[in-house]
Image (tube, rainbow, N blue to C red):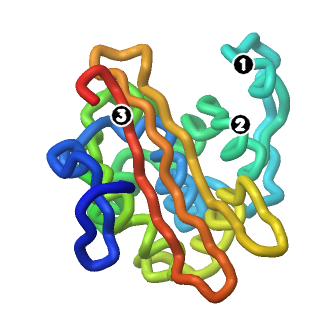
Amino acid sequence: VPVGPQKDGTRVLNEGRARQRYRPASTFKIANALIGLEVGSITDEKEVFPWDGKPKPRAAWERDQTLESAMRESTVWMFQEVARRTGKPRMQEWLDRLDYGNKDMTGGIDLFWLQGGLRISAMEQVKFLHRLAEGRLPATQRSQRLVRNALVVEKTRDYTLYAKTGSSGGTREPVEWWVGWAEKKGRPRAYFAMNQGPNA
């Protein structure tokens, strides 16, 4: 939620928008993966989810996937399968436990974060990521570690960037997200959650 007045180390640009909830779109893959690991819908980082051989919107999705590749390529079909394996009762239980946005699952088990009722604000995204980065979510350390590892998009000797994009461009409420955090030796973690859309 970068730039603007600084309060408690948080810089906010457009506080009204930072507090407004939007569909998480593919940023929900972070929570979906964590929940999937907790309930066994994803065995571990090595489990392979086979491609069904049918054409997909992106060429990178037309192959077997693991947690890491599906997070990197934002492979929707794999995370829809994870959600179906988890099922509505367990998913709702975990949304409540994680205090994820408005916790609204209307729209179907494999669509609620893409076209359905789930909404989350940039401020809530940062709070969730902060707890994940520090291993303070109500989930096992193993699951949190595997999700963190899957979110690494850049790593050098000096810093590591953990991030996820999200886009609900094909809906009536289009929004694009970039969320995550950066770690640099000797510095506190820097968390961010940015979104843009027609009202930005």
Picture coordinates of residue 14, whole percent (x, y)? 22, 46
Label annotation for residue 58: 1
Picture coordinates of residue 130, whole percent (x, y)? 43, 72
Tell me which numbered mark, 2 or 1, is placed earlier along the sequence: 1
Say which quadrant the N terminus sits in: bottom left
Residue kind at label 1, given as amino acid type: Arg
The quarter of the displayed image where residue 112 is located: top left
Q: Nearer the viewer, residue 1 or 175?
A: 1
Q: Can you identify the residue that label 2 sits on? A: 73
Label annotation for residue 112: 3
Picture coordinates of residue 133, whole percent (x, y)? 53, 74
Q: Residues within 10 Å of mark 2 (few under 14, many from 20)?
A: some
Q: Residues within 10 Å of mark 1 (few under 14, many from 20)?
A: few
> Residue 19, relative to residue 165: is it above or below?
below
Residue kind at label 2, given as amino acid type: Glu
Picture coordinates of residue 107, whole percent (x, y)? 30, 28
> Residue 11, relative to residue 176: is it above or below?
below
Instruction: Say if mark 3 contacts mark 1, CB within 8 Å.
Output: no
Q: Residues within 10 Å of mark 3 (few under 14, many from 20)?
A: many
Q: Residue at x 63, y 66 (%)?
A: 148
Say which quadrant the C terminus sits in: top left
SS class of the residue under badge 3?
loop
Q: Residue at x 38, y 62 (%)?
A: 126
Residue kind at label 3, given as amino acid type: Phe
Disc 3 versus disc 1: distance between alpha carbons? 21 Å
Disc 3 versus disc 2: distance between alpha carbons? 20 Å
> Residue 97, relative to residue 87: is it above or below?
below
Instruction: Say if mark 2 contacts mark 1, CB within 8 Å.
Output: yes
Q: Residue at x 44, y 32 (%)?
A: 176
SS class of the residue under badge 2?
helix
Disc 2 versus disc 1: distance between alpha carbons? 9 Å
Q: Is residue 52 left or right of residue 179?
A: right
